[in-house]
Image (tube, grey):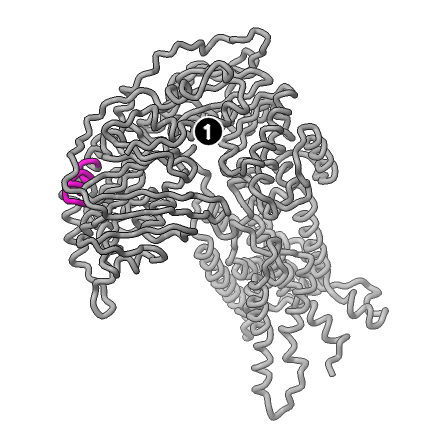
Amino acid sequence: MIDLVAFIPRAVAQGIPLLYGSTGEIITEKSGNLNLGIPGVMYVGAISGVIGSFYYEQSLTSKDDINGFLAVFIPMLCCLVGSLIMGLIYSFLTVSLRANQNVTGLALTTFGIGFGNFFGGSLIKLSGLDVPSIALSATSACFSKTLPFAGSVGWAGKLFLSYGFLAYLGIIIALVAAFIIRKTRVGLQLRAVGEDPATADSAGINVTKYKYVSTCLGCMIAGLGGLYYVMDYACGVWSNDAFGDRGWLAIALVIFTIWRSDVSIFASILFGGLYILYLYIPAGIDHMEYKELYKMIPYVVTMLVLVITSMRNRREDQPPKSLGLPYFREER
Amino acid sequence: MDGAVYMVAVHTLCYKLGISMDTGKSNDSKKEIAISFKNVSKTFGQVKASSNVSMDIYKGEVLSLLGENGSGKTTLMNMLSGIYYPDEGEIIIGGEPVIIASPKDAFAHGIGMVHQHFKLIDVLTATENIILGMPGKLDLKNAASKIKEICDKYSFDLDPYKKIYDMSVSEKQTVEIVKVLYRGADILILDEPTAVLTPQETEKLFAVIRNMRADGKSVIIITHKMHEVLAISDRVAVLRKGEFIGVVDTDRTNIKEMTDMMVGHSISLNIERPDPVDPKLKLKVSNLSVMGSDGIEKLHDVSFDVYSGEILGIAGIAGCGQKELLESIVGLQNITSGNITYIEDDGSETSLLNKDPRDISDMGITLSFVPEDRLGMGLVGDMDLIDNMMLRSFRNGKFGFTNKKDPRELAKSVVEELEVVTPDISTPVRKLSGGNVQKVLVGREIAASPSVLLTAYAVRGLDINSSYTIYDLINKQKKNGVAVVFVGEDLDVLLELCDKIMVLCEGKVSGILDGRTAEKDKIGMMMTGSGGTIDEQ
């Protein structure tokens, strides 16, 4: 039997990067931009944070001198700036130059992964270690710090309090995003832009501004998912390609959650659980190959989910109407 | 804009009617001027969409803006609502010239326009749509109660929490009108508001408009329906081909006078019209009815005959069923009832009912169709001339390969014979000018040596020379014994080119006239449904 108290915290830790990614993509898609560059953005967010943290740790004479605030602030700032630049590139290409959104997004993903691996490789060389990874354990310790009494409240502490601050931040961002999109005027106008930019434009809404801001904000949020993965989940260890295809799962989650970031909190944890389920299903020593089959579970579920969600008919559950389409102001 | 504003340059010859009318002066001193145009002109390229318009709009009146398609009604109103900016002249509100550069500016001056195509977001509720883009905190409850107030005041029927996708066309229109009122508009412009409504809904709308008038608002209705003009408006302003013809009080005019102002006198275009040689019945349409996808009947009990070697002109205000009629013949429409019969040269009859274009061509019948939407239905804009020629012959290849040789020859000969201006035959069609696109399309259709040629607005947007080339091509086909159906919007052209003219009004045939003896004003009356049914055969 699966040990739930051990399993759920692992599932949550797996789910948080997906939550960041899907929240970012939901905000982006609500403006009508289909950003398939999210996997790349998450790589860039992660490596930017790693670079910041690497140089900060290098500048210290001793690991004990580490300043908790700076150790968190520098990587976060680098991560946000890195992802923001990705968002700006995407917005400039698709909104200002009206390039094809799918191609632009896929190019950014390829670019982001290459960017991450290239600079990751360089840092590994710089650190001069024999292993193909960099360990930023001091920084990671600051990121994954929990409340002091978390360890002393038994299983409840393990389930709810055993995560670093970025996990809680991700949940808060998801809730706030859901509230803004559904309940505020900014959200209403954002939805209008994603549904029908021409109508929004004639109502006096600045379509370009909404598209830029939501795309860039979405990228910054997604970038934090990459940072969380390296600094908290992977305990500060960067190795190339370790982040894998979580970015794509995050995009699939957007459809699964019907463009609702609050639903994504549960959906992300569910998918996080599916992602590591193979570790908890006893396969025995004789049949290690079964484990490989179990690793397929999240992808099989994703495919099923996409098939099932595509059969939904309610109008509210459809993608934003102008998703993926460039907006030209009508002119004679 | 209702369709492309089109104009053959000969229109510049067109002159105003000699009816004298005071356009600038107020005829009722008690009334206050809400807004006035002073010598306003607007040109698109070479086309004058509005020229030198001067008129006043009073507070608390309903003004109809009457004119045919392309007469510049919508253009003029778009200058009020901030979509276009006048090239010349000024718009005066409260004695001061104002600049209306955007819809926002228009709202600031209390002007609101309800367009023919609604600007609403489907997944949002009526309330959300109405407050969209307005500043302040989002308070849907408060907004909804304000909307209720407006609805009660003018007796609108509207549920503020209903989603747009659940609404009928008339409800959507209500949302648009309430949206304008919610923003505090005093001048409402309605662009053909009744085009999409049933008679009952129209009555309701008119009741609301009367309430708004009683409240001191100015309502401008763009229309071409005479009986509605008479039913609702205080005054009528008439435009023709961008020119302002005049304003008359509704109770001091009649349909005859308004029609005369709308269509004007005939002018001579000197289009060749050879006499038909040995006309034989080619196509028989009987009792044709077609229901549109929106449940509104587009054609009702239409019957007519088309003869070889003759040109049958079809006149009517745009959207009166012309498109559905042609599409029914070529097999692109679902027909509710009626029959379409093709008569072979030997006199045998074949029904074209429930046949798609492929069936028809498999039967060995060549119907050529020059649709209204050239780059949508006729040609593929991104493909070059050769590939576009191939659209008619792509089935001729062998073993799954296409035959490109013949289309290339055809493209070459079309370019040479019709003097198409293009860098070469491998240029994408969308890069050509409108006239050249039309020549390519007509050239291809004629090359198929059709027995019936159907054209819709063949000269729309073309300059005079290209127009005459197209008339010549059509006449050549006529001489070759082709039965031609020519849907047109310029009555002068129809009167000079066609042997017979069938007039459509709201999907019904108002009459079929002889092209050589028909009078323009009579056709005008028939087009607007005010002339009754006239048979002159």
| x and y percentages locating residue B429 in the rendered image | 27, 46
Q: Is residue B179 left or right of residue B400?
A: right
Name the foreground residue: A231 vs B461.
B461
Q: Is residue B266 left or right of residue A206?
A: left
Q: Relative to B135, is B245 above or below?
A: above
- The residue that appears at 34% across and 58% down in the rendered structure is B355
Percent position of residue A11, x then y: 69, 71
Q: Quadrant of residue B217?
A: top right
Comparing A235 with B268, the one in front is B268
- The furthest residue to the right: A153
Q: Which residues are magenta?
A: B471-482
Pick the residue in front: B439 or A160: B439
Q: B386 or B155: which is nearer to us?
A: B155
On screen, A297 above or below A251? Answer: below
In the picture, which quadrant includes the N terminus of chain B?
top left
Which quadrant holds residue B72?
A: top left
Residue B507 picture quarter? top left
* Residue at which label 1 appears: B225
Task: Identify the secondary structure beneath mark 1.
Answer: loop
The disc labelled 1 sits on which kind of residue?
Lys
Q: Position of residue A128 (x, y in %)?
A: 54, 69
Secondary structure mostly taken by the magenta-highlighted segment of the chain: helix
